């Protein structure tokens, strides 16, 4: 999973930029609204609790979080979003899963298809690539002075994490989907702050890219992520170390 992890870290760095922050908050706001349909009390709604943790990890203000929750729960006027998942392929045979939250299915389908077609990809049938991925919890903790690697690893594994990886700038913790909430809560209570904490799709099968394909694949992912209706883009590309992106 090293290639996927490396790309995920690049996304995190890009996500910190001011230019993207507003778009990130808009997307998380949609997730909060959808999760709150099953109840606005996070103590009784595990999905909402997890999305709130994701919002906090992105430094979303509490009043903004609560406003999105109230809209989703019907306490404030808001838009009714529907979740749709598209699957397809990008350049070099890279598998792509695109999660969308939208109030206009026709617009979203046309937009996703257009982006794929114009950037060397194609839309496939449901299930055409999802078998290559597993739904997992993923928690990213930034390496800082005062944080001991062994302490983080033991806290994560004792809480039920499946895997722990120490990378150049971050610790990456992977959990089973059903254990994500309990591991996240245990690490929060231990005093750790997260760069990212969310359910994600991790590929079992990686496609190692040639240098000439890297920019094409990144361009497709960037275009998809820039679409207002697209919440998340998952892929199985492994970018070579010598590519500087």
Image (cartoon, grey):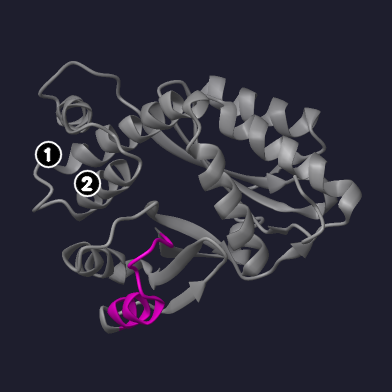
- Judged from the image, the secondary structure of the residue bearing numbered disc 1 is loop
Q: Residue reaching furthest top?
A: 77
Local crowd size for mark 1, using a 10 Å CA cut-off: few (<14), some (14–19), many (≥20) = many
Locate residue 139: give its quadrant.
Answer: bottom left
206 with respect to 191 (left or right): right
Q: Residue at x 65, y 34 (%)?
A: 222
Tell which of 151 and 36 is nearer to you. 151
Nearer to us in this view, 23 or 124: 23
Residue at the location (19% across, 24% down)? 71
Q: Mark 2 = which residue? A: 48
CB within 8 Å, label 1 to label 2: yes
In the depicted structure, whether residue 174 falls above or below residue 118:
below
Residue labelled with disc 1: 40
**Membership of 119 in magenta stretch:** no
Nearer to me, 116 or 54: 54
Q: CA distance from mark 1 to mark 2?
A: 8 Å
Q: Position of residue 109 (x, y in %)?
A: 59, 28
The magenta segment = 142-157
């Amino acid at each position: 999973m090293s290639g996927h992890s490396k790309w995920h870290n690049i996304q995190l760095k890009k996500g910190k930029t001011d230019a993207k922050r507003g778009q990130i908050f808009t997307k998380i706001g949609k997730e909060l609204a959808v999760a709150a349909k099953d109840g606005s009390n996070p103590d009784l709604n595990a999905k909402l609790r997890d999305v709130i943790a994701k919002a906090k990890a992105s430094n979303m203000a509490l009043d903004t979080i609560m406003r999105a929750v109230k809209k989703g729960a019907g306490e404030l006027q808001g838009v009714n979003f529907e979740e749709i998942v598209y699957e397809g392929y990008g350049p070099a045979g890279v598998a792509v899963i695109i999660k969308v939250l939208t109030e206009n299915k026709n617009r979203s389908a046309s937009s996703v298809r257009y982006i794929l077609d114009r950037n060397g990809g194609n839309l496939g049938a449901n299930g055409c690539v999802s078998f290559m991925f597993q739904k997992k919890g993923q928690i990213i903790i930034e390496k800082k002075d005062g944080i001991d690697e062994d302490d983080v690893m033991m806290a994560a594994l004792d809480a039920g994490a499946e895997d722990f990886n120490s990378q150049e700038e971050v610790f990456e913790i992977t959990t089973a989907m059903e254990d994500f909430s309990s591991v996240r809560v245990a690490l929060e209570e231990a005093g750790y702050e997260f760069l990212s904490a969310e359910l994600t799709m991790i590929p079992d099968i990686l496609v190692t890219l040639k240098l000439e394909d890297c920019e094409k694949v990144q361009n497709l992912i960037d275009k998809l992520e820039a679409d207002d209706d697209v919440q998340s883009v998952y892929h199985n590309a492994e970018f070579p170390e010598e590519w500087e992106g």
